[in-house]
Image (spheres, rainbow, N blue to C red):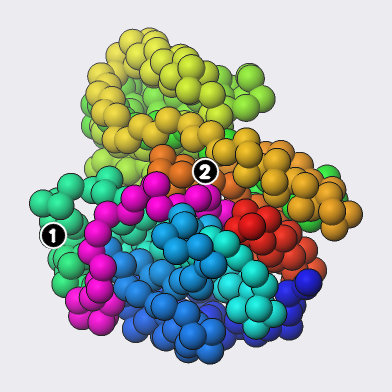
Amino acid sequence: MKVNAKRIENDIKAINNFNSTPGHGISRGTFTKEYMGAIDYIFNELRKTGADVKIMRGGNIRARLEGSITDAPSVMIGSHIDSVFQGGKFDGVVGTVTSLEVFRTIFEKKIPHRNPIDFVVFVEEDGSRFSSVLLGSRIWAGKVKEEDIPKILDKEGISYIEAMTSSGLIPEDNSILNGKEIKAMIEPHIEQSLVLESKGLSIGIVETIAGIKQLEVVIEGVSNHAGATPMNLRNDALCGVAEIILNTEKIASENGTSVATVGLVDVSPGKTNIIPGKVRFTLDIRDKDDTTLNEISERIIKSIAASCKNRKLSHAIKQVSYTKPVFLSKKVVELIENSARNQGIDTLRMVSGAVHDSSVMAELTDVGMIFVPSKEGRSHCPEEYTYLKDIEIAANILLESVIELSK
């Protein structure tokens, strides 16, 4: 039993026609007209299966093919279709269309299944509109307090509830996900890194999703005249930050598993002829092991304090977020491996440095993830690309895995 690769290719093209920045990557913000165009396309495909399609809590989508056993827990597959601003064509979309194709194939081939098969589209995974990643799955799973949902705003001041209602994705079922009603979930996704391509492999199987600690750091020195202040009498905040960034790079590089990124630097007053007196920057620190994550974070924090003391600068550090590593189901990992082995496909067990909706779902049920290679490791950019042959392999492995799970 095989999937239809041409249909997958057509799905990818069709969904990416809905884009607010043509010629400059893909921009498909949650609940926008572009997002709804893509959702309507998916709805039309689902109607062909006669599946029960519902808008769920938070605007997430669920389509169900009922199983032979009434009230059996479902096997869930799916991903997301929202994108970062001017991102790529494959992030989220690959997982969505491979899951859609498996869903269609099970229906069209009348493949017997004991458990219901749920195809889902999670909303606002990338956080590009409401600045909160995994928001849809977190709302659905009850991880966002009910009273906080109306307070979630985009940069225009439009609330999540208002945007969802205006789009027409008004929940028909507002209940919180119950993990007991889900037997397992598998999410296919692009790797967003270089590992699979460098090893010449088509498939990775995620064992762990890395933990993340995000910090906001403010360094303060003394603003002064850029021409009249001698070098030995300066308290330049930006020079201190430059030293801190290089020290952070060194610390994070030592163990071979951690990564650390300074992704945003805001210099004040930001003038060509004034010595920077204040710099705010962000730190994103990740590791697959929680103890290591905290140890590396502490070393970086101590390094910041030491650099500031030596340079007579002050500093303040605020922890913005902290997510522990997530360990996916050994049972599902092994099942995916067996499916790949049956098809003669070599695989690699992997750590995902990026977070996914699977991170949320793993708190509720057994979860697995299938990775496909990203060309040159590029992602969240217009150059993002994954070969159709690898997507087809992933879809066929997903199909066999779902059939096995739903026996």
Comparing labels 2 and 1, the label whose residue is closer to the camera: 2
Q: 157 or 241, which is in the foreground?
A: 157
Q: 92 or 58, which is in the foreground?
A: 58
Helix, strand or loop at label 2? It is strand
Mark 2 and mark 1 in contact? Answer it, CB < 8 Å: no
Residue on which disc 1 sits? 150
Q: 2 or 313, which is in the foreground?
A: 2
- How packed mark 1 is, by other alpha carbons closer than 10 Å (few <14, some 14-19, many 20 or more), is few
Placement of the N terminus among the 4 image quadrants: bottom right
Residue on which disc 2 sits? 366
Q: What stretch is highlighted in magenta?
A: 165-188
Helix, strand or loop at label 1? It is helix
Kind of residue indicated by mark 2: Asp
Q: 210 or 309, which is in the foreground?
A: 210
Q: Which mark, residue 94?
A: none
The structure residue drawn at horizontal position 32% and vertical position 78%, both measured from the top left corner, is 32
Q: In this view, does 282 lie to the left or right of 245?
A: left
- How packed mark 2 is, by other alpha carbons closer than 10 Å (few <14, some 14-19, many 20 or more), is many
Q: Where is residue 199 in the image (x, y as percent from the top left)?
A: 83, 45
Placement of the C terminus among the 4 image quadrants: bottom right
The structure residue drawn at horizontal position 41% and vertical position 78%, both measured from the top left corner, is 52
Q: In this view, does 64 lie above or below 143?
A: below
Kind of residue indicated by mark 1: Pro
The structure residue drawn at horizontal position 63% and vertical position 39%, both measured from the top left corner, is 331
Q: Position of residue 222 (x, y in %)?
A: 24, 26
Mark-to-mark CA distance, 2 and 1: 31 Å
Q: Is residue 350 left or right of residue 213?
A: right
